[in-house]
Image (cartoon, rainbow, N blue to C red):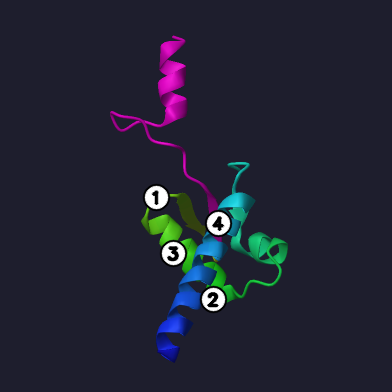
């Protein structure tokens, strides 16, 4: 029973870390993992990497590596037909 309680708290913390990461990326600009770790004080590297991994796998954030630096940004919303919402909006103005 103790292990189940610990796992539940861990899953809850993981969800909170994911929400914090998404809030930090709300401006849709690219941010380095180092920048985010400084901004999100109180979150360990392990927590940040775990949230980054989960969010990139489900498509909520875009992740790219340049040299030894990882860059993250919030993913563009997808619309039906496979394009981004921005691309769909721009196509109506042409």
Towards the viewer: 67 or 3:
3
Q: Residues within 10 Å of mark 4 (few under 14, many from 20)?
A: some
Q: Which residue is mark 3?
A: 53
The secondary structure type at the circle numbered 1 is: loop
The first of marks 4 and 3 along the sequence is 4
Looking at the rendering, the stretch of residues picked out in magenta corresponds to: 70-94
In this rendering, the label closer to the viewer, 4 or 2: 4
Name the outermost residue toward the left. Answer: 81
Name the residue rendered at 46%, 10% in the picture. 93
x and y percentages locating residue 90 in the rendered image: 46, 18
Whole-percent x and y of residue 46? 54, 76
The residue carrying mark 1 is 59
Q: CA distance from mark 1 to mark 2?
A: 20 Å
Residue 87 % position (x, y): 43, 25
**Displayed quadrant of residue 44:** bottom right
Label 3 Cα crowd, 10 Å radius (few <14 / some 14-19 / many 20+): some
Residue 19: mark in rendering: 4
Name the spot of residue 42 as percent of width and height, x first.
Answer: 69, 72
- Helix, strand or loop status at disc 4: helix
Residue ID for mark 2: 46
């Amino acid at each position: 029973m103790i292990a189940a309680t610990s796992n539940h708290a861990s899953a809850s913390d993981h969800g909170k870390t994911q929400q914090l990461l998404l809030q930090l990326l709300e401006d849709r600009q690219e941010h380095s993992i180092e920048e985010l770790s400084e901004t999100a004080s109180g979150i360990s590297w392990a927590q940040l990497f775990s949230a980054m991994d989960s969010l990139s796998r489900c498509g909520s954030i875009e992740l790219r590596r340049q040299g030894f630096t990882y860059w993250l940004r919030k993913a563009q919303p997808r619309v039906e037909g496979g394009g981004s919402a921005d691309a769909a909006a721009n196509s109506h103005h042409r």
